[in-house]
Image: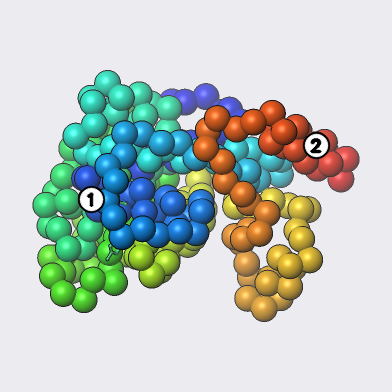
């Protein structure tokens, strides 16, 4: 089991081309690109709240299901929560998730306490669907994990995916919402939406090599929270 640290680490797995990077980039930067650029491994950071203090959500976008085995094992060992992505247009991409899921079970043991979301991406694709929603749901029931269909292209269920994943964490309270750091704009948005849990304005995302200024900002936010 990974130790409880100030980082909350989410790892995204799935076959090449299913849309892992697109989902992560849509979430952290709000962008989408049509072209396919294979990923080696990228990590993004975002400030979130965890047990009423500030912590860092670290999202690791992996290269695909044929990742180097040692890297894959390390990602699983270090990860707190997992997103397993297939494309609804590829039955094979769902099948390729099975060995990854099994490896998570072996390494983590008690997986009922590990947040895992099975994700059927590209649900905007009207033609060429190979995996029905019910097939995804059935797999998730077998794996005792959560399930969602998304589209990085149309931004369908992307923020919800990350928020739901954090909601599955039962050992600590992790939220995209930073308590006490709501901007006027956010408060307005919350009023409009009724219940809003995702920060849209203040949660700037960073590639892991964050600079010192950001570190300072985080520390001052922490100090502010402690004073409250
Ligand atoms: N139609 C559609 N295409 C997508 C979606 N997500 C990603 N793609 C496309 O699928 C290709 C692979 O995406 P990418 O995120 O690089 O896949 P990765 O290898 O899993 O990281 C790219 O051409 C994307 O534009 C989606 O939700 N809908
Ligand atoms: Mg990628």
Q: Which mark is residue 17?
A: 1
Q: Nearer the viewer, mark 2 or mark 1?
A: 1
User: Are the two marked residues, 2 and 1, in contact with CB atoms closer than 8 angstroms?
Assistant: no
Q: Secondary structure at mark 1?
A: loop
Q: Is residue 128 left or right of residue 199?
A: left
Q: Looking at the rendering, in which quadrant would you find the N terminus?
A: top left
Would you call the spot at circle 2 few (<14 residues within 10 Å), some (14-19), or many (20 or more)? few
Residue 109 seen: no
Q: Which mark is residue 169?
A: none
Q: Looking at the rendering, in which quadrant would you find the C terminus?
A: top right
The quadrant where ligand 2 appears is: top left
Q: Position of residue 218 (x, y in %)?
A: 72, 37
Q: Earlier in the sequence, mark 2 or mark 1?
A: 1
Q: Which mark is residue 220?
A: 2
Question: Separation of disc 2 and disc 1 at Cα?
Answer: 40 Å
Vertical comparison of 176 with 135: above or below: above
Q: Secondary structure at mark 2?
A: helix
Residue at the extreme top:
70
At horizontal 60% and vertical 38% (from top left) the residue drawn is 56
Vertical comparison of 41 with 52: above or below: above
Q: Position of residue 38 (x, y in %)?
A: 27, 42
Q: Is mark 1 within 8 Å of ligand 1?
A: yes
């Amino acid at each position: 089991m990974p130790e409880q640290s100030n980082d909350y680490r989410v790892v995204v797995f799935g076959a090449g081309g299913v849309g892992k990077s697109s989902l992560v980039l849509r979430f952290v930067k709000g962008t989408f690109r049509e072209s396919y650029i294979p990923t080696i491994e990228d990590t993004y950071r975002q400030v979130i709240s965890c047990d009423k203090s500030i912590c860092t959500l670290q999202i690791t976008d992996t290269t695909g299901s044929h990742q180097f085995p040692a890297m894959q094992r390390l990602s699983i060992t270090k990860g707190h929560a997992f997103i397993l992505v297939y494309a609804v247009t590829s039955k094979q991409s769902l099948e390729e998730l099975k060995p990854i899921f099994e490896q998570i079970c072996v390494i983590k043991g008690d997986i009922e306490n590990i947040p895992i979301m099975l994700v059927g991406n590209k649900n905007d694709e009207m033609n060429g669907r190979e995996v029905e929603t019910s097939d995804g749901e059935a797999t998730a029931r077998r794996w005792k994990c959560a399930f969602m269909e998304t589209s990085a292209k149309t931004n369908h269920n992307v923020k919800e995916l990350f928020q739901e994943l954090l909601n599955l964490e039962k050992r600590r309270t992790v939220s995209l919402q930073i308590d006490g750091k709501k901007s006027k704009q956010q408060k307005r948005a919350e009023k409009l939406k009724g219940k809003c849990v995702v920060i849209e304005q203040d949660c700037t995302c960073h590639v892991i090599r964050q600079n010192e200024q950001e570190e300072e900002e985080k520390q001052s936010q922490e100090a502010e929270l402690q004073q409250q």
